[in-house]
Image: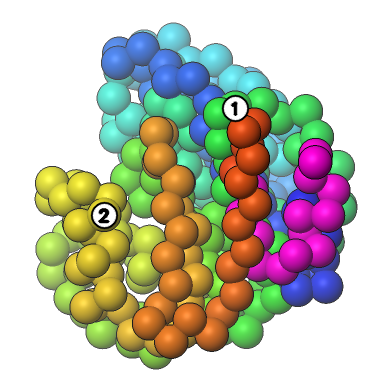
């Protein structure tokens, strides 16, 4: 399905996969790093050794090229803070008990092969192909976007008020990492979930706060949600069978799904 959307998004791609939840005492984070200054692969084992020495969280890595998923005991915030201080080249992609995330620049086929998407497993996933119109083509600006734990969002369209949403959220202590308009929607909706809203209630408030043309697909550890703006000018196609539900921006992306 991802490769079928190549013409709509040839510059970068990503996939968030939701699997079985870890025990309550454990978390995992997905990380990305560019090449080191000498062009070598990143030293993920050295990072994990440093984390374990400093925090004693028994972290273990699952490494795929310039991405790694670290699993560890305890809450995520101390590990995230350590990673941020350890190396500015490291980018946090996701946090939670269920979600793992891979995203990078390149065609969807290149990214899918690079991170072996064909053999990812889980209960549900959210993927995206991007043709940049609002910000630079970089791994951190590719979709899916995440905020908080076990929440991600992909976006087809354009928001007209992302700066207004940022100005509303930043005084509440919510920090932004990119200039992408999709991040504003992602952080607004996750903020509402963190404030106690159900996903349905958060989306209702999103209709009031987010202005523009959009189709959003969101994933949590237990739910998927698809919404479109009131004008519904950005497409969405849903195929539902006894075995699966598949959602895409175009029919052709569904052509390879089982019948």
Residue 145 left/right relative to 125: left
Task: Please give the label number shown on residue 200.
Answer: 2
Seen in the image, is 195 located left or right of residue 248? left
Quote the CA–CA distance across marks 2 and 1.
23 Å
Residue under the image location 76 percent in, 38 percent down = 117
The label on residue 13 is none
Give the image location of residue 259, x and y in percent.
80, 41
Q: Nearer the viewer, residue 100 or 121?
A: 121
Q: Which callout, 2 or 1, points to the residue nearer the camera?
A: 2
Q: How far from the left and from the top, in percent, is residue 146?
A: 44, 51
Q: Position of residue 190 (x, y in %)?
A: 29, 54
User: Residue at horizontal 56%, vertical 36%?
Assistant: 124
Precedes in sequence: disc 2 or disc 1 = 1
| Element marked by disc 2 | helix
Residue at mark 1: 122
Magenta segment includes 253: yes
Q: Is residue 190 above or below residue 61?
A: below
> How many numbered discs, if any?
2
Q: Is residue 132 above or below residue 22?
A: below
């Amino acid at each position: 399905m991802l490769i079928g959307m190549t013409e709509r998004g040839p510059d970068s791609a990503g996939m968030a996969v939701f699997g079985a939840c870890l025990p309550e005492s454990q978390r995992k984070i997905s990380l990305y790093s560019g090449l080191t200054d000498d062009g070598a692969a990143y030293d993920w084992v050295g990072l994990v050794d440093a984390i374990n020495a400093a925090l004693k969280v028994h972290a273990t890595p699952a490494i795929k090229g310039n991405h790694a998923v670290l699993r560890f005991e305890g809450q995520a915030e101390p590990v995230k803070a350590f990673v941020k201080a350890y190396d500015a080249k490291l980018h946090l992609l996701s946090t939670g008990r269920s979600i793992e995330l891979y995203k990078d620049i390149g065609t969807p086929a290149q990214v899918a092969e690079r991170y072996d998407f064909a053999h990812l497993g889980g209960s549900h996933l959210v993927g995206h192909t991007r043709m940049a119109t609002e910000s630079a083509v970089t791994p951190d600006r590719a979709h899916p976007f995440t905020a908080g734990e076990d929440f991600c969002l992909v976006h087809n369209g354009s928001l007209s008020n992302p700066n207004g949403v940022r100005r509303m959220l930043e005084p509440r202590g919510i920090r932004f990492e990119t200039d992408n308009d999709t991040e504003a929607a992602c952080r607004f909706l996750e903020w509402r979930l963190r404030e106690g809203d159900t996903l349905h209630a958060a989306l209702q408030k999103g209709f009031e706060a987010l202005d523009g043309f959009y189709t959003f697909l969101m994933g949590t550890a237990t739910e998927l949600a698809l919404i479109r703006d009131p004008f519904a000018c950005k497409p969405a196609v849903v195929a539902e069978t006894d075995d699966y539900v598949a959602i895409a921006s175009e029919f052709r992306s569904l052509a390879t799904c089982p019948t």
